[in-house]
Image (tube, coloured by chain):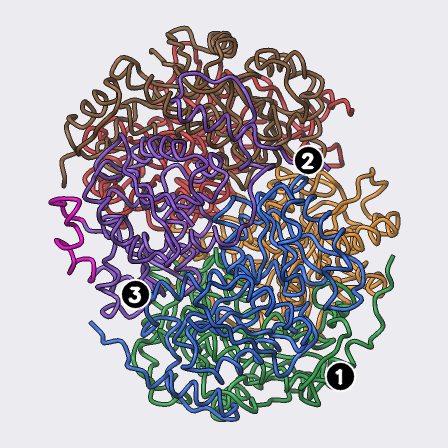
Chain colours: A red, B orange, C green, D blue, E purple, F brown
Amino acid sequence: MKLLVINPNISDDVTALIESEALRSASPGTELVVRTAGHGVEYIETRFESLIAAGAVAEIIAEHHGRVDGVVVAAFGDPGMPALKELADVPVIGITEAALCAAALQGHRFSIIAISDRIRPWYLDCVERFGLGGRLASIRSINESLNAIGSVQQDFKETLLALSRQAVTEDGADVVILAGAPLAGLARDLRGQIPVPVVDGISAGIRMAEAVVGLESGPHRAGAFAPPPVKARRGLSENLDAALAAAQSAPAASKN
Amino acid sequence: MKLLVINPNISDDVTALIESEALRSASPGTELVVRTAGHGVEYIETRFESLIAAGAVAEIIAEHHGRVDGVVVAAFGDPGMPALKELADVPVIGITEAALCAAALQGHRFSIIAISDRIRPWYLDCVERFGLGGRLASIRSINESLNAIGSVQQDFKETLLALSRQAVTEDGADVVILAGAPLAGLARDLRGQIPVPVVDGISAGIRMAEAVVGLESGPHRAGAFAPPPVKARRGLSENLDAALAAAQSAPAASKN
Amino acid sequence: MKLLVINPNISDDVTALIESEALRSASPGTELVVRTAGHGVEYIETRFESLIAAGAVAEIIAEHHGRVDGVVVAAFGDPGMPALKELADVPVIGITEAALCAAALQGHRFSIIAISDRIRPWYLDCVERFGLGGRLASIRSINESLNAIGSVQQDFKETLLALSRQAVTEDGADVVILAGAPLAGLARDLRGQIPVPVVDGISAGIRMAEAVVGLESGPHRAGAFAPPPVKARRGLSENLDAALAAAQSAPAASKN
Amino acid sequence: MKLLVINPNISDDVTALIESEALRSASPGTELVVRTAGHGVEYIETRFESLIAAGAVAEIIAEHHGRVDGVVVAAFGDPGMPALKELADVPVIGITEAALCAAALQGHRFSIIAISDRIRPWYLDCVERFGLGGRLASIRSINESLNAIGSVQQDFKETLLALSRQAVTEDGADVVILAGAPLAGLARDLRGQIPVPVVDGISAGIRMAEAVVGLESGPHRAGAFAPPPVKARRGLSENLDAALAAAQSAPAASKN
Amino acid sequence: MKLLVINPNISDDVTALIESEALRSASPGTELVVRTAGHGVEYIETRFESLIAAGAVAEIIAEHHGRVDGVVVAAFGDPGMPALKELADVPVIGITEAALCAAALQGHRFSIIAISDRIRPWYLDCVERFGLGGRLASIRSINESLNAIGSVQQDFKETLLALSRQAVTEDGADVVILAGAPLAGLARDLRGQIPVPVVDGISAGIRMAEAVVGLESGPHRAGAFAPPPVKARRGLSENLDAALAAAQSAPAASKN
Amino acid sequence: MKLLVINPNISDDVTALIESEALRSASPGTELVVRTAGHGVEYIETRFESLIAAGAVAEIIAEHHGRVDGVVVAAFGDPGMPALKELADVPVIGITEAALCAAALQGHRFSIIAISDRIRPWYLDCVERFGLGGRLASIRSINESLNAIGSVQQDFKETLLALSRQAVTEDGADVVILAGAPLAGLARDLRGQIPVPVVDGISAGIRMAEAVVGLESGPHRAGAFAPPPVKARRGLSENLDAALAAAQSAPAASKN
């Protein structure tokens, strides 16, 4: 199984964190192709930054069209989801939706621990859009300035631990999600110190993608995630244009 | 008052429909600047096409940064909303959210009449995301192939009228919304023949934008719609880069 | 365009505040007819007081039947809504629903700043009934006794400013609504001092009514807001009786 | 225990139906005082008619202030609820909320069988406002003209039976509610012919009022249903004015 | 009328509290049969303990099959509900659902006062499952260790009173529910000291069961609460097996 | 990794179906221990049958306490969930929640295809309890009598295919879930004939359990899924008693 793992941001050090944790999480037979966004921002905190990132992710998915078995979009907040699921014939999974499922299968209410206050409304949108808003205990976040995005988990380890514990004791979280690619791998460190299951977004993304790809549920040939109908288009990148053309020429579902 | 009206699609004939209805709807003192997306598809039917359009709209908003009093995003489904509200210091309003408000102020339940079956899940997402899903009576749609996007309202006038009446009698709609820029202006024709108020997306977009711009509520200097925090970015268009830079250098809210 | 603006309470000094802000907000071509409730209480804080006010507003709407282009019910909490929309052939709009729309078009979550603790459950009912409860960040209120209803905005200016800022920083409000006719006009003063858009109920009511009336969406000839079916009635005021009779004799929607 | 049972409409023949079923339902020690609205319409089908009825009911409650142990508002749709609960020191219960509770305690999903199509949106509002919208299987209604409100249950017995059965087999109702005072007593006839529990609004109103009055839970001296704060009022009826004055002079809750 | 009242726990001293309050609450003509769970735990605090209790309650219901007119399941959290309603031809009512109805008929928002922090998620599940989660103001709980389950109401009277008052002043409760059989009867003591109606679970269970049984709504012969279809079963207790057999041989609803 | 897979019913032929599909789905390193309920019914269609099954599943989990890495409860409707998650220190996952996650990661709306009409309310409860009710397109079911539970998928293959296609074309399903252990393995057959991804409950249960177990998120030492507090218990089976004792003596979370 070959998974394309995309960092929707331009930060190579975060890509390195993603890759490390992805490698630790992947099953023996899983091959990983890890890519960094070609354009965008250092890290996503807002709805508009997420929109920019979505476009960059689309380009990378299109570039790898037909050459991977699944895609993991490795930024919390799931930029471009669920729209990007239309673009490929294989599962395209965001790390937030993967983490939400991993949490929901282990408890009833969960909390998300985030790297900045500004990021919270976007995360909340994402949880509500996925449909699990009713199970969200809280989103807690660091409210200090970050030094560098690549060292957040070292710089704020104690803060993140304290936020996680507060989520359990004050907000009623049954599971804690350490959100965001910059925190990739931290869950392994903190588990013994937090009295409930702790979910890492990257690990959840890899594991859940493996599970879903392994199910071989079949492609979308009808419905809202089938390739868009053929129509005039203009000004798209060569890759994107080709991906849309390829998708649209796939055998349509026979009506019955 | 100067309003930038953006057709998020590449179809010039739909831009013409938009412009005509926008001119009919605008108040005397309102100046309109109408633009067509620089890249994208002929008309949006899916979540992914909407994502492409969102990027194209962002470019046009950025290009006009600081030179208009408000922006109307003139495709039903509100591509890029609410993210695009971050990008400008002035109100940025989608025609769907405007039409939903216009409908919600005139009745309790409303129906949306749409140009294709495929478009419905995207519209439903949009209504639910805006928070008024509980007041949606139905989304009804043409389920035949379209000849040309610019002539949908002529080609399917009787069908659209029948769908509107069914929405009232079978679905309990108190108000009918004729959705989509390709239907711009049709509401004026059909009103006498539909026994409830009929809302046109473009008219609603213009009128609601005028109302909100006129309120002079002030800009976002804090919270989720303030300009994104300053951080490294790469590969953005010149206009977008400049718009982000300008927004971020605006005087921040003084903390209290 | 002629708008009937009704103060649902008996307080003439609040009517004066309403009229001043309404005049400041109205577009050049808009004529305002401002009226005070003929019976009721000084200001509405509870569900029952709102019920009394609804009856008083109905009388005034009935009295002006057929002589105005739209009606603004100028008390936050929208007494009698949406029932009063049945009573006239023209748009009848409450200032709360108008303010909610104005806020929802400018951000995602909004807070309401209110003049008393007791008033909050009624306001919450109103937001939930309109269907936007999911976007309410908070309702914050003055919890001191009021000296006089006409001077609340002077007497508590600093408190109202502090509550507004807390709504932004603690509750995540993207937009602040200064609720209640007694606060009419205060938003103009406070805007520079609150770091998000600030919406005034009266202004929003006037502007949104202008927008909706301008859309000329057509009357309700079927559905839940058409005039009630003809049936025996007794003991109603002359005006109300006449208004119901007139509405019921309007040409019914032709069935199809 | 003395219960005041109010027909919110002016139809004496419906009052007779209410009284008969109320007498059949009441426990041995319960005394009933049955009253008809002093003004209003023949029967309520719309939100506005319900608003008129609410005012009429308020007058009767005020007239009996301090002289009964509980009040039953005997029109489906619960005109004036929950506002009317503020007006008395004793439980004030609508037959809809009583029927919803009786149904919810006997099954999971319930359907409402109503006497006219027009009445459905108002009933739906009522169920949603009470908070049990998620358990509503359907509202089905007679869609023919009524001959006389007092003979609906005879004239449409077969239709009502068919609608009830459809609610079970097609909509998944676990319990059927025969809605509206004009159907008072019909449930006794139809029970054997409908394969799920059948709830009569009037019976449920009487039984639930007896249960709640019997609990002696104590009055509202604080919170949203305490009497409204003292303030200037004008133009109210003598009874209403006296009831408000009496309520407001009750010993306030001691703060702690 | 004969009511079977079941303590789903093995604690005889709590059964005594239940019986005392049930006797105080029951109407003259009501006969009570009070039973204690044959197996299980001392008191239920968790979802799993509730599952164990549900099985124990099923045994007692089965044992009394056909010999009572109604059943009250006397533990807050309603173990086994709504499944247990399938098992008998008579109303089976939990004290939580009864208390929620009693509260919802007396105010809009209610709070639950509970005996331990651990118990809160289970109670919250129960309120949400019943469908009234939108009206829950708060669940407040004792967060100290209990000495003995039979003396909780004496040992923590002041704490429970303080929690009740906080629910009113801080959480906006219109009604307070004292939850859990160990608090049976306490509401009678505290009423004068809490400024809103106070509901006791046991009293509410008895009164609501009397009301519902008195309605004689008829049995479930179709739908989700009819007896389960006949099929092979194995290893059930003699009583349970007999009860299922008896239920399944009841005359099925005649299809129409 | 060793997974305990429990058929909550007494039907050995369904256990065989479960085991076959589980073996086809499991990853190379996964060892399966498959068990059949010791008591209960042939197959679960109702809430009460599910309650019986929950008790039987608890016994098997208790019996294997400490000897497996994860548990799959292999009946659609997830009997005993989420309560059973308290009982073990390892993930306990129902096939419904697993299938819902697998579906939700592949599309937005999903439908469930079920083996009998009676089963639908229970399934609906389950989806709503998990929190994804807002994404459910429909539950469609066979409405004919079953010959034998072990041959349902052969006997009704065409019906199940037709129901699946209707879910896509009429209900808007993006993904179809073939529900229930009796349909285990059928998805592999039907995939090419249904134009959207098709999810099998058993496969999803195995794959999702592998993914979650593989995450090693850590146990519940606090919160709602920690082992129940120590207290008197009576009459439990030896295994269950031992499992509770073992769980409760695990090192508690250190408070901070």
Question: In the image, which residues are magenta?
Answer: E143-161
Q: CA distance from mark 2 to mark 3?
A: 51 Å
Residue B213: image quadrant is bottom right
* Left or right of F50, for residue D77: right
Identify the residue position indicated by label 3 in the image.
E168
- Given residues C245 and E15, the one toward you in this image is E15
Asked whether the residues under marks 1 and 3 belong to the same chain, the reply is no
Callout 3 amino acid: Val
Q: Chain of mark 2?
A: E
- Given residues D101 and A211, the one toward you in this image is D101
Identify the residue position indicated by label 2 in the image.
E254
Callout 1 amino acid: Gly
In this rendering, does residue B59 appear at all? no
Identify the residue position indicated by label 1 in the image.
C66
Mark whose residue sits in front, 1 or 3: 3
Q: Chain of mark 1?
A: C
**Residue E154 is covered by the magenta coloring:** yes
Callout 2 amino acid: Ser
At x 74% / y 62%, what residue is drawn? D152
Q: Secondary structure at mark 2?
A: loop
In this rendering, does residue B169 appear at all? yes
Residue C99 coordinates in the image, percent (x, y): 53, 70
Task: For label 3, count other residues whose C-alpha is less than 10 Å away and answer few (under 14), some (14-19) or many (20+).
Answer: many
Q: Earlier in the sequence, mark 2 or mark 3?
A: 3
- Given residues D44 and E253, the one toward you in this image is E253
Kindly indicate whether the residue at mark 3 contacts the one at mark 1 (C-beta within 8 angstroms): no
Q: CA distance from mark 1 to mark 2?
A: 56 Å
